[in-house]
């Protein structure tokens, strides 16, 4: 039974538990002549919650733990002698998982006998041919031990799935029956139901915190492994980025940081003034008809896929800047440049500034505008001296969101700015960013045992620290200039 079927069965059992719990509450109240403490629906909710929540929590935990346990067990079956020289055990385990998945497809086609497969009574060269038929290509040098580990992996996963279904469904039925037996007229079912909901809300609020903690810990641990292989001083202070994957790599982050900040600065120089002026016009000058049309039209820019912006930069903006500005002035011959990516990215993040700033400016109390006009101020003076200072904390937050969006962009940079890691002030030269190199270092057949791969985690942690610093700076500005208005 697959995971989707288990979840569906649990939900059906919860629905049945709700109906039966409600009926039992009404029946016990009628039989005893005692009024129910809570509404009948709360008794049904109690049964449904006891059926569904613990079972689904156990299911989630099982899905997380089972692969770890199985891989740990199967990993012990692979001797060091079958690990390719210069390779990693993780790559062999990837082959094991791939073969195990292919075996299911082979058995579904009745191309192999499952009993013979489990007992090791089949020719492994025959298995390789059958796997090729279902699209699983395995090299001819894959040793027998890898196939045996894959068979064991598949068998353990099958037993684990059966055990998971039995445990989850047994827990749902058991707790459902127990909660049914607890139903009494004096039972505080409403309190039980509300406590469940409160716990669910607390758990939901913890997801973001735990996710952030998980991201940070994963980055930190892998970054520590990277700095055990590569000097931290060279990573942070070297001006050369030249990964080789065969030794002799130079992995300096400074060219990547420069490209990231340079392109983001160009994007913000485009987006912030234009976005802020759009927000001011829509909030204080535009009529209702124009506003109802213009604001959704501007927000469409935020919904365009970034790959489309990248193509626009590649085939339109880049050649235009090269042919009409860079080449005539002798500043460059490439259509991929910082200015190309920055301009297109700036257009993309305009809605982040304009839409949020518009909402924030509209949130400023009308009484403040009226008071300014009553003192003789013009509309422009009111905007500059009353509305913008009052909305400054929110505007800073909008600019921060736009900056974070610009720093984390990848596709526009790949197509518009190129992939050259260099330190240069010329905006018509090709450069690259941290995010682009994170993708390139983790693309293809990678093994997490070399500095050329682990450097992606160090880059990610550095980018995380930069965005965290931006958030701290924004909080400082907001707290310094925040004013409270009635």
Image: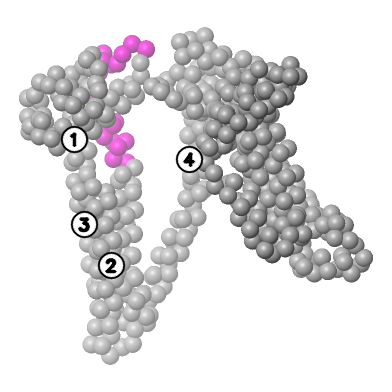
Pick whichever of labels 2 and 3 is earlier in the sequence. 2
For this rendering, which residue is in front, 352 or 58? 352
Question: Which residue occupies the foreground of this view, 65 or 93?
Answer: 93
Q: Which residue is drawn at 66% across and 33% down?
A: 342
Task: Specify which label sits upstream in the sequence, 4 or 1.
Answer: 1
Left/right placement of residue 480 relative to residue 159 reads right
Q: Is residue 301 left or right of residue 185?
A: right
Residue at x 69%, y 64% (from the top left corner): 288
Nearer mark to the viewer, of 2 and 3: 2
What label does residue 104 carry, if any?
A: 1
Assign a secondary structure to mark 4.
Answer: helix
Q: Dot 4 corresponds to which residue?
A: 214
**Looking at the rendering, which quadrant does residue 377 occupy?**
bottom right
Instruction: Name which of mark 4 and mark 2 comes first in the sequence.
Output: 2
Alpha carbon distance from label 1 to label 2: 34 Å
Which residue range is magenta in the image?
A: 65-86
**Residue beneath disc 2:** 15
| Residue that mark 3 sits on | 170
> x, y (%) of residue 54?
32, 57
Q: Is residue 76 magenta?
A: yes
């Amino acid at each position: 039974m697959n995971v989707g079927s288990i979840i569906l069965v649990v939900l059906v059992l919860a629905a049945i538990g709700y109906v039966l719990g409600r009926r039992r509450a009404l029946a016990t109240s009628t039989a005893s002549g005692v009024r129910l403490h809570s509404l009948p629906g709360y008794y049904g909710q109690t049964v449904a919650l006891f059926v569904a929540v613990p079972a689904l929590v156990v299911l989630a935990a099982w899905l997380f733990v089972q692969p770890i346990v199985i891989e740990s067990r199967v990993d012990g079956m692979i001797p060091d002698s079958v690990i390719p020289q210069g390779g990693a055990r993780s790559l062999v385990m990837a082959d094991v998982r791939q073969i195990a998945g292919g075996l299911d497809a082979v058995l579904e086609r009745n191309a192999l006998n499952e009993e013979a497969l489990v007992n090791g009574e089949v020719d492994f060269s025959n298995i390789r041919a059958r796997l090729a038929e279902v699209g699983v290509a395995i090299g001819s040098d894959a040793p027998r031990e890898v196939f045996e580990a894959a068979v064991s992996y598949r068998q353990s996963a099958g037993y684990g799935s059966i055990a998971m279904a039995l445990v989850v469904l047994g827990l749902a039925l058991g707790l459902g029956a127990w909660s049914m037996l607890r139903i009494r007229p004096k039972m505080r079912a409403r309190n039980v139901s509300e406590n469940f909901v409160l716990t669910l809300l607390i758990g939901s609020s913890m997801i973001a915190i735990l996710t952030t903690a998980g991201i940070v810990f994963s980055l930190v641990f892998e970054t520590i492994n990277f700095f055990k292989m590569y000097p931290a001083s060279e990573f942070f202070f070297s001006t050369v980025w030249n990964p080789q994957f065969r030794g002799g790599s130079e992995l300096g982050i400074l060219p990547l940081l420069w490209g990231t900040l340079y392109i983001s600065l160009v994007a913000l120089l485009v987006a912030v003034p234009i976005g802020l002026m759009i927000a001011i016009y829509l909030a204080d000058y535009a009529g209702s008809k124009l506003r109802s049309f213009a604001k959704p039209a501007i927000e469409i820019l935020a919904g365009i896929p970034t790959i489309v912006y990248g193509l626009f930069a590649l085939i339109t903006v880049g050649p235009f800047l090269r042919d009409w500005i860079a080449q005539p002035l002798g500043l460059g011959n490439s259509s991929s440049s910082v200015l190309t990516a920055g301009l297109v990215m700036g257009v993309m993040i305009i809605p982040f500034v304009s839409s949020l700033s518009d909402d924030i400016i509209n949130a400023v109390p009308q009484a403040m505008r009226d008071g300014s006009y009553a003192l003789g101020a013009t509309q422009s003076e009111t905007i500059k001296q009353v509305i913008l200072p009052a909305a400054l904390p929110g505007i800073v937050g909008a600019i921060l969101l736009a900056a974070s969006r610009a720093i984390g962009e990848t596709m526009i940079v790949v197509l518009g700015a190129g992939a050259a890691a260099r330190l240069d002030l010329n905006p018509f030269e090709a450069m690259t960013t941290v995010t682009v190199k994170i993708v390139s270092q983790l693309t293809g057949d990678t093994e997490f045992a070399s500095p050329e791969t682990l450097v992606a985690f160090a880059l990610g942690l550095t980018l995380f620290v930069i965005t965290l610093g931006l958030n701290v700076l924004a909080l400082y500005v907001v707290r310094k200039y925040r004013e409270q208005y009635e």
